[in-house]
Image (cartoon, rainbow, N blue to C red):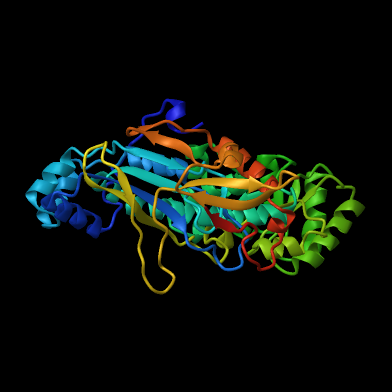
């Protein structure tokens, strides 16, 4: 359920200025040259995965659809462009009526991708497609990076619950997007109420060290929290002495205490000590939650520890060292004249330094081996081979300017689980390596 699903009024700001100026100056020049209405196809892809990653995760597709729908040049935006002399009068007139009327195809959200995978294709006139470059890339690069980090952390957690708690470590708006991407990638809840409100993600939260420090003693703080939230709450036990805190926590809440949280120190050692102490005190059902600058490697190192849940902040919302996926938006085909019937011809950038691209609007399929495990990412521009037709990856997202593939976030989350299950087991390794699937062009 989203805000709109609740029947609440929703302010829908224009996304038209979430763009780089040169998108508008290219539009102006193309309008003047008479080439703006040539039919084109742009593709979003990453030339490579972040170093050491085995797979990427498509995140942000739903937000892209929202951004495209709200890409409108209202009077206030047009006046800003006019005052700053960013584009000329004829261009402003064209922008005043802008509505994307083309098609968008792409990998469905939650699907995995590999180098070269055409995760999104935008088709329409050059004028309407070029304007969307920056906003599409800003969403996909951010959300896919966080979703990939979340996926790796979920693999490392091995089914133990994960809490996203990175709102204070990033921009307030990107924090909401990061919560969404983390949930997509396998996290179970978030501490960010804005994300919970907007995307119906389960929210959690109890207390910080400041609450303990506020009171005259730790016992007073624990008593106040249990009186307010009940014995099933989570008590933070590392403000002073962990052992004494655990003893007080069970004494106050009883063996029904929900959980204790450890936020500092040697988490592996402390988790074992706390588990032993809780069991001795009869609190065998009390869970242990650990936080403190965790990433996928720290989570994996705690696999054998008696930890029941993890809370992750900084490393998650910054992509665990890779805050972007380096996706690009490239023109791969264009017509030589205006008109919907004009045939498209492949075009491609040919440059030094690994920045070349493959021309032509491409289909994508994932070829399985005899056991049904994914064996290769296959891309092509001609007819799809018979054996690959049922394994194609792209779906129609927008047709004739109308969104046709909106779905609940949980559907994308479930898709990601299925996509991971179809990959070779080596995809789950955290050690540095090459992409788990090769990319083949046919």
In the displayed orientation, state which residue is furthest to the right.
280
Q: Residue at x 71, y 61 (%)?
A: 429
Q: Residue furthest left?
A: 89
Count all numbered tags in the image, as a single digit.
Answer: 0
Q: Position of residue 385 (x, y in %)?
A: 55, 42
Q: Nearer the viewer, residue 28 or 231?
A: 28
Picture coordinates of residue 120 (x, y %)? 44, 47
Whether residue 52 can be seen here: yes
The x and y percentages for residue 181 are 53, 48
The residue drawn where x is 27% and y is 36% is 341
Q: Is residue 261 left or right of residue 380?
A: right
Q: Position of residue 110 (x, y in %)?
A: 56, 44
The picture quadrant where one finds residue 304 is bottom right
Residue nearest the viewer, comparing 165 with 274: 165
- Asked if residue 252 is positioned above or below residue 156 in the image, the reply reads above
Using residue 371 as the reference point, say whether residue 58 is left or right of it.
left
Give the camera-side residue of 287 and 411: 411
Please tell me which residue lies in front, 146 or 119. 119
Q: Is residue 205 visible?
A: no
- Residue 89 is left or right of residue 224, and the answer is left
Residue 350 in the image: above or below residue 45? below
Q: Residue furthest top?
A: 7
């Amino acid at each position: 359920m989203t805000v709109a699903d609740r029947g609440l009024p929703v302010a829908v700001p224009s996304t038209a200025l979430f763009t780089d100026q040169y998108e508008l100056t290219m539009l102006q020049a193309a309008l003047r040259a008479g080439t703006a209405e040539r039919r084109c196809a742009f593709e979003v892809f990453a030339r490579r995965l972040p170093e050491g990653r085995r797979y990427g995760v498509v995140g942000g597709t739903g937000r892209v659809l929202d951004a495209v729908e709200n890409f409108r040049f209202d009077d206030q935006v047009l006046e800003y462009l006019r005052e700053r002399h960013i584009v000329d009068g004829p261009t402003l007139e064209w922008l005043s009526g802008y509505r994307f009327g083309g098609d968008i195809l792409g990998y469905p959200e939650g699907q995995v991708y590999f180098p070269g995978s055409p995760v999104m294709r935008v088709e329409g006139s050059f004028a309407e497609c070029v304007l969307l470059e920056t906003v599409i890339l800003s969403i996909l690069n951010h959300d896919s990076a966080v979703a990939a980090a979340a996926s790796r952390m979920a693999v490392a957690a091995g089914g133990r619950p994960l809490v996203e708690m990175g709102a204070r470590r990033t921009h307030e708006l990107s924090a909401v997007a990061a919560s969404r991407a983390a949930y997509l990638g396998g996290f179970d809840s978030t501490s960010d109420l804005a994300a919970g409100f907007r995307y119906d993600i389960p929210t959690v939260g109890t207390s910080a060290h400041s609450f303990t420090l506020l009171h005259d003693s730790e016992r007073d703080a624990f008593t106040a929290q249990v009186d307010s939230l009940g014995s099933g709450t989570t008590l933070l036990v590392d403000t002073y002495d962990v052992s004494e805190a655990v003893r007080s926590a069970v004494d106050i809440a009883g063996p029904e205490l929900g959980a204790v949280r450890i936020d500092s120190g040697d988490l592996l050692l402390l988790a074992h000590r706390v588990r032993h102490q809780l069991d001795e005190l009869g609190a065998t059902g009390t869970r242990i939650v650990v936080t403190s600058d965790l990433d996928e490697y720290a989570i994996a190192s705690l696999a054998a520890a008696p930890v029941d849940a993890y809370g992750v902040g900084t490393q998650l919302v910054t992509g665990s060292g890779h805050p972007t996926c380096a996706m690009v938006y490239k023109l791969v085909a264009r017509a030589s004249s205006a008109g919907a019937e004009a045939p498209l011809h492949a075009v491609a950038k040919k440059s030094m330094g690994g920045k070349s691209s493959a021309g032509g609007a491409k289909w994508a399929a994932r070829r399985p081996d005899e056991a049904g495990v994914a064996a290769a990412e296959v891309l092509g521009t001609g007819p799809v081979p018979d054996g690959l037709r049922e394994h194609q990856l792209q779906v129609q997202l927008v047709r004739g300017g109308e969104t046709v593939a909106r779905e609940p976030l949980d559907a994308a989350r479930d898709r990601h689980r299925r996509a991971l299950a179809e990959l070779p087991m080596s995809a789950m390794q955290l050690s540095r390596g090459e992409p788990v699937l090769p990319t083949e062009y046919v």
